[in-house]
Amino acid sequence: MVLLDADPFLNELTKLYEHNRDSGTVWVTLKRSTLKPHAKRKSEDGAEAYRCLVRATDGKKKISASLTPKDHHRFQMAYATVLKAHMDSLKKREKKDKKEKKPAPATKS
């Protein structure tokens, strides 16, 4: 697995989406991380600053990135742009047939 910075990660993620456009799947996971070299970073208010680990794979190629809390919002905005650009090749969801509605009972007058 290759650990990249945020911008190269997004570039590689775009390539993964384009490669799997017609058929295939790309899995993306985000989780809070305590990477060893950066595990005990303290912020100004004394709380620990956790990093965010982002991973992506298509089953063959794996990429990952580690984000600081400062970079997280900017990354989310750029990630949303990448997702919006590649959501056009999704399959339509099949709708289930609804049961036939029973006719309303006749009222006596």
Image (cartoon, helix red, strand yellow):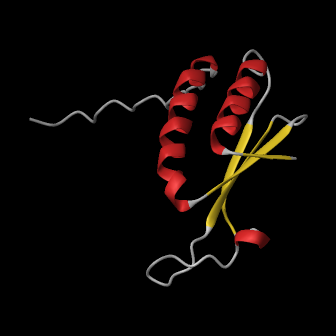
Q: Residue at x 55, y 22 (%)?
A: 85
Residue 73 x, y percent position in the rendering: 47, 50
Residue 64 x, y percent position in the rendering: 76, 47
Q: Do we see residue 96 in this rendering?
A: no
Residue 83 x, y percent position in the rendering: 57, 31
- Give the left or right position of residue 101, taking residue 30 as reference: left
Seen from this angle, which residue lies furthest right?
60
Q: Residue at x 53, y 52 (%)?
A: 71
The foreground one among 104 and 18 is 18
* As drawn, 56 above or below 87: below
Seen from this angle, which residue lies furthest left?
109
Seen from this angle, which residue lies furthest bottom?
46
* As drawn, 94 above or below 49: above
Q: How many marks?
A: 0
Q: Do we see residue 56 in this rendering?
A: yes
The foreground one among 97 and 5 is 5
Quadrant in which residue 59 is drawn: top right
Seen from this angle, which residue lies furthest top?
22
Q: Residue at x 75, y 68 (%)?
A: 35
The foreground one among 49 and 59 is 49
Considering the image in quadrants, where does the C terminus appear?
Answer: top left
Q: Residue at x 49, y 84 (%)?
A: 46
Residue 6 x, y percent position in the rendering: 64, 43
The foreground one among 54 and 3 is 3
Quadrant in which residue 66 is drawn: bottom right
* As drawn, 21 above or below 26: above
Quadrant in which residue 91 is drawn: top right
* As drawn, 77 above or below 40: above
